[in-house]
Amino acid sequence: MKYLNITLFISLICVMPLRSQDHDHNHDHDHSDLRNEIGFSGGALYSFDHKVWGAGMHLHYFRSIGAHGKWALGGGIEQAWVHGPHFTVGAGAKYQIFDRMHIGVMPGITFFKHSDTDSSDAHEHEDSDYHSRFSVHFEAVYELIRRGRFHLGPAVDCSWSKDDAHIMLGVHVAYCF
């Protein structure tokens, strides 16, 4: 946990000065009239249950409610490579806290391979390579750089299920239309 706190602190210190370097306001598009977003996040992932690092990626689509709404509905998929691969499919909502900051929550289903769980669960699913668990995926995104319909910035994703809890520190890139 100590290393995770240090990583978060260093990430924030490194990212905040970058925004002050973004002086090209002519390419900044008012995203309030763009109702659709396709986004991708990728980064380093830490599993709290297994105390190991890995990698992860998340792809989502959101559509805002109303022309200038702060709320959006959508869905996404996540792939994690930590203590065996597993993937999640979910649907949920995101909220625009302020102009460039969004948070989202997506309840869903995570699919694990048998080797990712304890042996007491494995015999329940002998006919399938994967088993599923309810999960919840949270994300926070800051749009550090906007260029036309694209935005780029840091992201923090957290995921929880009975068999796994992890956090991903990474980069988010999205196309709005």
Image (spheres, rainbow, N blue to C red):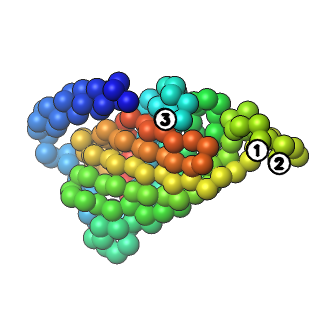
Q: Quadrant of the C terminus?
A: bottom left
Residue at the (55%, 30%) spot, across then down = 50
User: Vertically, is 57 above or below 67?
Assistant: above
The answer to whether 167 appears left or right of 82 in the picture is: left
Foreground residue, 67 or 13? 13
Q: Say which element carries label 1.
A: helix
Q: Residue 124 got which mark?
A: 2
Which quadrant of the structure image shows residue 171?
A: top left
Asked if the residue under mark 3 is in contact with the one under mark 1, i.e. CB atoms within 8 Å, the reply is no
Q: Secondary structure at mark 2?
A: helix
Seen at 38% across and 61% down, the residue is 94
The amino acid sitting under disc 2 is Glu
* Residue located 82% across and 47% down the image: 125
Q: Quadrant of the N terminus?
A: top left
Q: Which mark is residue 15?
A: none
Label 3, on which residue? 48
Question: Earlier along the polypeptide chain: callout 2 or callout 3?
Answer: 3
Kind of residue at disc 1: Asp
Q: Earlier in the sequence, mark 1 or mark 3?
A: 3
Q: Do the residues under discs 2 and 1 have CB atoms within 8 angstroms?
A: yes
Secondary structure under the numbered disc 3 in the rendered image: loop
Q: Position of residue 72 (x, y in %)?
A: 39, 66
